[in-house]
């Protein structure tokens, strides 16, 4: 006679809700940190900086583990995660301001 499945952890709906809320908090926190690190003398408009930072945070949330997200928000960033941040930022610059991160002509202050 087959054994019943063993219950482990919380119900899926609870863990999915937690992951969704944690992801949302990560994206908000990482976006805020990113925007704060961009020099005010940047050639990019504030709106473009916000778009790039939000895009980067969302890509990071898709590419890294929950543990890595926690580490980033507390300032402990591994070399692997640094590479993921660099790649995500590059991808978002390309998507937001054009090929190879070059500033779009229409994005002047």
Image (cartoon, rainbow, N blue to C red):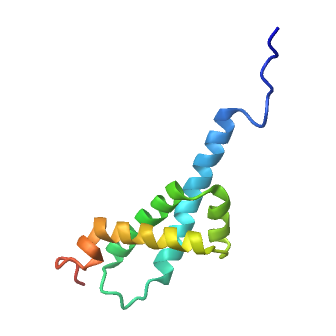
Q: Residue at x 62, y 70 (%)?
A: 72
> Where does the image place residue 41, in percent across and percent down from the top left?
36, 91
Which image quadrant: the N terminus?
top right
Residue 53 visible in the snapshot: no
Quadrant hosting residue 4? top right
Q: Residue at x 54, y 75 (%)?
A: 33
Residue 13 sits above or below residue 24 on the image: above
> Where does the image place residue 77, in percent across and percent down from the top left?
63, 74
Q: Which of 48 and 79 is in front in this view?
A: 79
> In the orientation shown, which residue stands out farthest toward the left?
105
Q: Which of 68 and 37 is in front in this view?
A: 68
> In the orientation shown, which residue stands out farthest toward the top?
1
Residue 62 sits above or below residue 84 on the image: above
Left or right of 40 in this view: 33: right
> In the orientation shown, which residue stands out farthest toward the front?
1
Quadrant hosting residue 42? bottom left
Left or right of 97 in this view: 23: right
Total count of labels: 0
Residue 2 visible in the snapshot: yes
Q: Which residue is drawn at 62% across and 63% down?
A: 69
Left or right of 56 in this view: 69: right
Q: Residue at x 66, y 34 (%)?
A: 12
> Where does the image place residue 21, in percent across and percent down from the top left?
60, 50
> Where does the image place residue 14, in percent across and percent down from the top left?
68, 37
Which image quadrant: the C terminus?
bottom left
């Amino acid at each position: 006679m087959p054994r019943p499945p063993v219950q482990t952890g919380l119900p899926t709906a609870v863990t999915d809700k937690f992951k969704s809320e944690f992801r949302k908090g990560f994206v908000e926190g990482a976006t805020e940190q990113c925007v704060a690190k961009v020099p005010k003398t940047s050639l990019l408009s504030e709106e473009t900086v916000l778009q790039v930072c939000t895009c980067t945070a969302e890509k990071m949330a898709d590419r890294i583990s929950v543990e890595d997200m926690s580490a980033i928000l507390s300032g402990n960033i591994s070399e692997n995660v640094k590479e993921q941040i660099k790649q995500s930022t590059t991808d978002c610059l390309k998507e937001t301001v054009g090929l190879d991160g070059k500033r779009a002509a229409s994005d002047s202050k």
